[in-house]
């Protein structure tokens, strides 16, 4: 069919050659096993949109695990099987492939749609979130490139609409409310009016409370990991979602300015090879939490699955974020020493500092980043062994001497080992042991 040829040339054009060839191999393997195989979901959506996406989700009409085993052997990849769900995933190199079995049992709303073209695939796709995510692309040789579009997903993609497949979609899975917002903002689509109505209804019925904080948090993290989360956050405000996720958060014009300032700041940091956050969502999360009341922060700390270090930082931001922010500002204006800065920075992570700086001038924050890097990278030339060689008896004062050394070398007062040794001698010679504070 011409449509099939058209999709095949689109794939050849847009996909890396390795992926295209891999798809042909997968199709042939599936032919040999006598099963139908499809790539589905976000991969197909992004292929049609011309967005790069290399997370491959396969759905098999037949025994998914058996096929995954064959495919893993063929690719010499690593296989992990989840018997209970009939799914498996394969890793080879840095490529990941998820394999699922299309099964009828998942068909939960038999009355919601007439079963005209009933197939296992259709039912698998029908239980998904949105029409644009419910497209499938067949990989079998004779159907290679055939787009399976049961729910007019392609039309919605073209018109830029996020539409659910059935009325109760958000009630059944309220995390989809956040997903709808994420996709809407990422692709600059709109949530289709009726779908928006369903979302509002689910929110009004407090459905979000029915979901675990773990799951909601995962979706919030995905929103905060988008290139620029601010528009999605504004949309969440509009729909009244914060009272469930971050109670008491007030989305103000100033907060929006702060949030919108973070992506360009992170870009400048990366462009200048300055320290970047390990995970960018954390900066946004901290910046949001900064605006919460004590009760709000307590709620977050109690409900979300956070690492202890992160919980501590959230409380710290609440207690002393503003004063640290002011000290940093004073430091930047006053050209003080690095050792002075180091003591201000004590106990803060880079992500949390960036959150404290959100909305401040980029140029000053870049200066701070340079100083942070210098502090991080600097250490005295002398170490414990050198102190021992100087005849100083080992003990707790080593740490204190090394701290002093570090401060002095940070401030550029000790150019070489000899200068450091002289500094240590001077410390030791002083009547009052300077390290006892
Ligand atoms: N899905 C769903 N309901 C959810 C989560 C996921 O129906 N609550 C379905 C969607 O159809 C989605 C697929 O599972 O396409 C895979 O989910 P995921 O990998 O999270 O989404 P992607 O669409 O690949 O999105 P992203 O680009 O963010 O990875």
Image: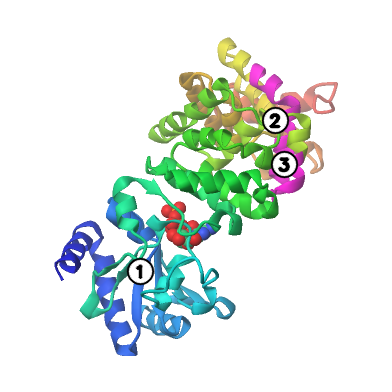
Reading the chain from its start, which is encountered first: label 1 or label 2?
1
For the residues labelled 3 and 2, say whether their Cβ atoms are less than 8 Å apart: yes
Q: Which residue is drawn at 47% across and 82% down?
A: 65
Quadrant of image for the N terminus: bottom left
Residue marked by disc 2: 292
Q: Which of marks 1 and 3 is in front?
A: 1
Which of the pair 45/13 is nearer the observer? 45
Q: Where is residue 149 in the image (x, y as percent from the top left)?
A: 32, 64
Tell me if I can see residue 414 in this picture: no
Residue at image mark 1: 39
> Is residue 399 shown above or below 357?
below
Decide if residue 342 is on the left or right side of residue 104: right
Q: How crowded is mark 1: few (under 14 residues within 10 Å), some or many (20 or more)?
A: many
Q: Are marks 1 and 2 in contact (CB under 8 Å)?
A: no
Viewer-proximal residue among 96 and 386: 96
User: Which of 372 and 81 lies nearest the eye of the viewer?
Assistant: 81
Q: In which quarter of the image is residue 351?
A: top right
Q: Ligand 1: does it lie within 8 Å of the C-beta at label 3?
A: no
Q: Is residue 145 above or below residue 230?
A: below
Please report the residue visible at 71 percent of the width from the left and 20 percent of the height from the top. 323
| Predominant SS of the magenta segment | helix
Mark 3–mark 2 Cα distance, whole angstroms, equals 10 Å
Q: Mark 3 points at which residue?
A: 300
**Please, which residue is most extreme toward the top here?**
334
The image shows residue 410 at horizontal and vertical percentages of 60, 26
Quadrant for residue 188, please give it.
Answer: top left
């Amino acid at each position: 069919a011409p449509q099939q040829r058209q999709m095949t040339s689109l794939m050849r054009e847009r996909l890396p050659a390795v992926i295209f060839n891999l798809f042909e191999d997968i199709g042939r393997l599936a032919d040999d096993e006598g099963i139908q195989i499809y790539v589905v979901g976000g991969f197909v959506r992004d292929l049609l949109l011309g967005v790069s996406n290399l997370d491959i989700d396969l759905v098999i009409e037949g025994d998914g695990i058996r096929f995954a085993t064959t495919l893993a052997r063929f690719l010499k990849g690593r296989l992990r099987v989840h018997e209970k769900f009939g799914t498996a995933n394969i890793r080879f190199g840095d490529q990941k492939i998820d394999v699922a079995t299309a099964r009828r049992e998942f068909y939960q709303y038999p009355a919601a749609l007439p079963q005209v073209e009933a197939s296992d695939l259709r039912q698998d796709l029908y239980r998904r979130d949105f029409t644009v995510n419910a497209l499938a692309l067949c990989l079998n040789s004779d159907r290679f490139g055939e787009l399976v579009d049961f729910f007019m997903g392609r039309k919605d993609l073209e018109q830029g609409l996020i539409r659910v497949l059935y009325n109760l979609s958000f009630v059944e899975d309220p995390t989809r409310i956040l997903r709808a917002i994420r996709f809407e903002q990422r692709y600059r689509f709109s949530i289709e009016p009726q779908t928006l109505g369903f979302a509002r209804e689910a929110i009004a019925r407090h459905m979000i409370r029915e979901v675990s904080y773990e799951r909601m948090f995962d979706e919030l993290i995905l929103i905060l990991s988008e290139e620029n989360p601010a528009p999605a956050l504004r949309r969440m405000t509009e729909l009244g979602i914060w009272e469930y996720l971050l109670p008491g958060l007030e989305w103000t014009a100033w907060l929006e300015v702060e949030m919108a300032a973070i992506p360009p700041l992170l870009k400048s940091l990366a462009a200048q090879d300055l320290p970047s956050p390990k995970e960018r969502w954390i900066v946004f999360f901290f910046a949001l939490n900064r605006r919460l009341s004590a009760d709000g922060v307590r709620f977050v700390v109690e409900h979300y699955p956070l690492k202890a270090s992160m919980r501590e930082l959230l409380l710290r931001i609440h207690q002393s974020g503003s004063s640290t922010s002011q000290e940093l500002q004073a430091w930047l204006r006053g050209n003080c020493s690095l050792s002075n800065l180091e003591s201000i920075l004590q106990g803060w992570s880079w992500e949390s500092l960036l959150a404290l700086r959100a909305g401040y001038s980029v140029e000053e924050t870049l200066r701070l980043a340079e100083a942070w890097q210098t502090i991080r990278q600097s250490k005295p030339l002398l170490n414990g062994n050198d102190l021992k060689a100087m005849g100083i008896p080992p003990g707790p004062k080593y740490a204190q001497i090394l701290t002093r050394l570090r401060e002095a070398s940070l401030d550029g007062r000790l150019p070489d080992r000899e200068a450091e040794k002289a500094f240590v001698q001077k410390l030791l010679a002083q009547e009052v042991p300077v390290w006892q504070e």
